[in-house]
Amino acid sequence: MSTTYTEKVGNKLNELLEKSYDAEKGYHKAAENAKSPDLKGYFERKSKERNQFGHALKSEIRNYGQEVDKGGSAAGSMHRAWMDVKAFFSADNDESMLEAAITGEKAAVDDYEDVLKETNLPPSTATLLTSQVSQIKNDLATIKSLEDLA
């Protein structure tokens, strides 16, 4: 393969990996606290999805010989903005959790698009990231119906 996986790309993918796991935990917590059964189901599905995203990202990072961060890196902890945790837990109601999730998903789209701008992404990485960000965007487009339930 002519494309080399740079450390910079590895670092960006590790940041996405950290955020995927943060989102997974956030959605899991939201599912535990949601009152609406529909919202609870949505949050559970999103938690599982982010777990799958994380595993796929890990495989991709390893496929190109880069190190997978084990979590807790300085970059990872500084970027933990998936949900405003304070607002999320203090408000502990369905509407607030959904708003926090929407904000987090919009930030995730920006993060993915930032990495996709890299010109030296191997085709398999670009395909994986495009697929994941499309899933996030599709959910953002349909999340309005859940806002009515909250």
Image (cartoon, grey):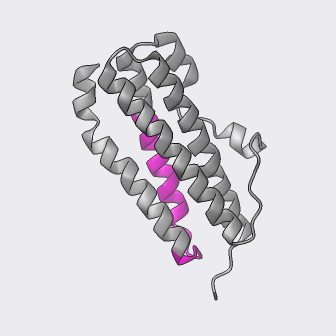
Above or below, 117 against 122 in this view is above
Q: Is residue 95 rendered to the left or right of residue 90?
A: left
Is 113 inside the magenta-drawn segment? Answer: yes
- Reply above or below: 59 against 93: below
Q: Which stretch did the figure color magenta?
A: 102-123
Question: How many badges with numbers are in the image?
Answer: 0
Q: Main secondary structure of the magenta part?
A: helix
Q: Position of residue 26 (x, y in %)?
A: 54, 30
Q: Position of residue 48 (x, y in %)?
A: 49, 41
Q: Position of residue 118 (x, y in %)?
A: 56, 69
Q: Is residue 44 above or below residue 8?
A: above
Q: Is residue 136 magenta?
A: no
Can you say which quadrant of the picture contains the C terminus?
Answer: top left
Q: Which residue does the image show at 46% across and 16% down from the upper left?
A: 33
The answer to whether 141 is drawn above or below residue 97 in the figure is below
Residue located at (31% from left, 49% from top): 138
